[in-house]
Image (cartoon, rainbow, N blue to C red):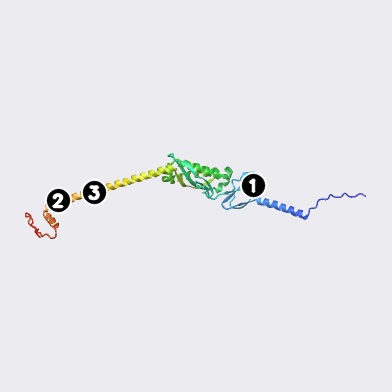
Amino acid sequence: MSQFPQMPQFPQFSLKGKNLITIIIAVIAFIIILDGLVSVPPGHVGIIYDRGRGVLTEKELPEGLHLKIPFWQVSYLTDIRTQEYTMSVAPGEGAVYSDDSMTAPTSDGQTVAVDATVLFHVDRTKAADLFQTVGPDYIQKIVRTVSRSQIRAVIANYSAIDVYAKKREEAEDKINEVIKDLFAKKDIILERVLLRHIAFSAQYASAIEEKQVAEQKIQKAEFQRQEAEKLKEKKIIEAEADAKAIELKGQTLKKYPQVIQFEFVQKMAEDINWGIMPDSIVPLLNVGQ
């Protein structure tokens, strides 16, 4: 009697194995879903890189939660808040990005040390273009390079004393104007360049101090000369007034001789007896008393 062939036996999965598969599938699904979400924090924009189309420059993601194609699209975040790039002689002085103080030549052949701060932010609507053309290290490539070179270039048009005091504000405005245009071409918005401190070499500072002392001495001498001129003019005026008074007095005495007798009497001592005599008679005095 022939027997029916036995059916092949398939391995039986235990309940524990089924649970493991379920967990693996759930983890994979969670990873896929998680990779498909983009969370953009405050003060940032999201940039999407599509493996087929490249950077999606027409679509910056605003703050909030967004969807993308898992594993096919990659998201990057760009800070669009105000950022600070500081060049200072004090290490680490900048709150965000710090660098060494820079030196710059002046038009009169001197060298000054410059501490400056550059305030800027990325253009929200051009963040993807900046990421595509420059990359995430735009501070090193654009902000640092442009700022340091243009500050030097502008200061080279001024003398040391002008950039230190007389025309410092003018130089700062010119620096802002030039850097603003260059930043705009790279989708970065300049807020302000601040020249916080400008220092000379010790030799030049000493020369300036000596010059200021000499100028003060000259100013003092000029003041004394002017005072002497004023005093001279005063004495001349007084002398002219005295001469005029004497002339008038002489004219008066000549016209009224009795005035002489009157003044003579006025100047006598109180214990002398006197009397008024005719014009042709000499007065008699009681000198015995």
- Viewer-proximal residue, 147 or 240? 240
In the rendered picture of this protein, how many numbered marks are placed on residues? 3
Dot in front, 3 or 1: 3
Can you identify the residue that label 1 sits on?
A: 73
| Mark 3 or mark 1: whose residue is earlier in sequence | 1
Give the amino acid at mark 2. Answer: Gly
Give the amino acid at mark 1. Answer: Gln
* Residue with the most extreme front position: 288
Q: Residue at x 28, y 47 (%)?
A: 228
Dot in front, 3 or 2: 3
Q: Secondary structure at mark 1?
A: strand
Q: Which mark is residue 235?
A: 3
- Viewer-proximal residue, 12 or 182? 12
Give the amino acid at mark 3. Answer: Lys
How crowded pointer 1 is (Cα within 10 Å; few <14, some 14-19, many 20+) is rated as: some
Can you identify the residue that label 2 sits on?
A: 250
Q: Is residue 260 visible?
A: yes
Q: Is residue 226 left or right of residue 253?
A: right
Task: Name the spot of residue 62 as percent of width and height, x first.
Answer: 58, 51
Q: Quadrant of the C terminus?
A: bottom left
Q: Secondary structure at mark 2?
A: helix
Q: Is residue 184 visible?
A: no
